[in-house]
Structure formats: structure tokens, C-alpha cells
Amino acid sequence: MTWVKGTFFMVLANVTWALWIVLQSALLKEYPNKMLVTVTQCVFSTVQSFVVAVVAERDFSKWKLRFDISLLAIIYTGFVVTGVSYYLQAWCMEMKGPVFLAMSNPLCFVFTIFCSSFFLGEIVHLGSIVGGALLVAGLYSVLWGKSREAMESEEEGKEEQKDAAKASSVVEQA
């Protein structure tokens, strides 16, 4: 039964992340300051995480920070993993659009399988390999379709320019 809950939460997380990417794309078109968008996202994430942490762990003695590797991990996660990655995602979205960013997310699953097998020595099951292969195939098929769509729209744009040039020359001759 726990795998059903886990699957449900994973689907919910991916759907909400996809919705956020679409909303963030619209936000960046309206307000192109990526740094302010990133800071705002981090502040709201911090508040949301704080509320979840208070509900999950009410013993505040466990919240104490110690000057050891755990503090370094918290600082690294806060600045590099969260801040830098959110900024790079906003940059990627500005350059290639939300579809490209959303389609790159399945590669995280493949990377996680590789790292857990290589670094942690976990056994990789056939289902994980097949799932990873299907994710990569889906990723590249969407990106292939997107590039075909872009090429077709470029060709249509060139044809429209030729038609407009012909129409203007006909008007000039008349």
C-alpha cells in the first residue's frame, strides 16, 4: 500500500512542478528579472518548508545547528542546489522555453539510478532500467517533435515573406 501512496505523491509532485514551470514561463515573460523571481521562489519555498517542518518535528531541540558537516550540507543545499539551480532553470526557460525544461526533468531519474548503483552499490532492477529507457525515449521524441515543429514554422514564415514580397511588387506595378 505504501508504493501506491508513493506513486500518487510522485505524480502529484511532477504535475505541480510542470504547472509551476508553465506559470514561471508566463511570469518571466511579464517580468524578466530572473534573480528576483529566483529569490521570491526561494523565500516562498523556505516558508513552506518551515511550516511542513513544524508540523513534522515539534521537538525544537532537534532543530539546533552544529558546526559540522551537516551545517555545510545545509548551506550547500540552500545556495547551490536551490538558488543556483532555480536561476539556471529560469535561464534555460528563457532561452529554450518551458517544454525544454520540463522534458529535461526525466533525466534526473536516470541520473539517480546511475548514481545509486555506482556510488551506493544498490541493485538496479529491470523495471528501473526499462522505465529509464522509456523516459529517455519519451524525452527525445518530444524534443525531436519540438525541433520539427520549429523547422516547419520557419519554413512557413519564409513562404509568408515571399508571398508578401510578391504582393507588394504587384501593388507597385499597378
Image: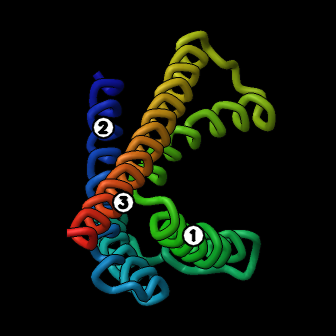
Q: Amino acid at mark 3?
A: Gln
Q: Position of residue 80 (x, y in %)?
A: 64, 73
Q: CA distance from mark 3 to mark 1?
A: 36 Å
Q: CA distance from mark 3 to mark 2?
A: 44 Å
Q: Amino acid at mark 2?
A: Val
Numbered mark located on residue 161 in the image: 3
Numbered mark located on residue 68 in the image: none
The mark that comes first in sequence, 3 or 1, is 1
SS for tag 2? Answer: helix
**Label 1 neighbour load within 10 Å: few <14, some 14-19, many 20+:** few
Residue at image coords 30%, 37%: 11
SS for tag 3? Answer: helix
Q: Report if the CB atoms under discs 3 and 1 are less than 8 Å apart.
A: no
Q: Nearer the viewer, mark 3 or mark 2?
A: 3
Q: What residue would you read off at disc 1?
A: 88
Q: Quadrant of residue 23?
A: bottom left
Residue 19 relative to residue 128: left or right: left
The mark that comes first in sequence, 3 or 2, is 2
Q: Quadrant of residue 125?
A: top right
Residue at image coords 30%, 54%: 163
Residue at image coords 54%, 32%: 140
Residue 171 relative to residue 59: left or right: left
Q: Nearer the viewer, mark 1 or mark 2?
A: 1
Q: Report if residue 134 is visible in the image.
A: yes
- Indicate the quadrant containing the C terminus: top left, top right, bottom left or bottom right: bottom left
Whether 118 is drawn above or below 62: the answer is above
Numbered mark located on residue 11 in the image: 2
The mark that comes first in sequence, 1 or 2, is 2
SS for tag 1? Answer: helix
Residue in front for this viewpoint, 113 or 151: 151
Residue in front for this viewpoint, 103 or 154: 154
Q: CA distance from mark 1 to mark 2?
A: 24 Å
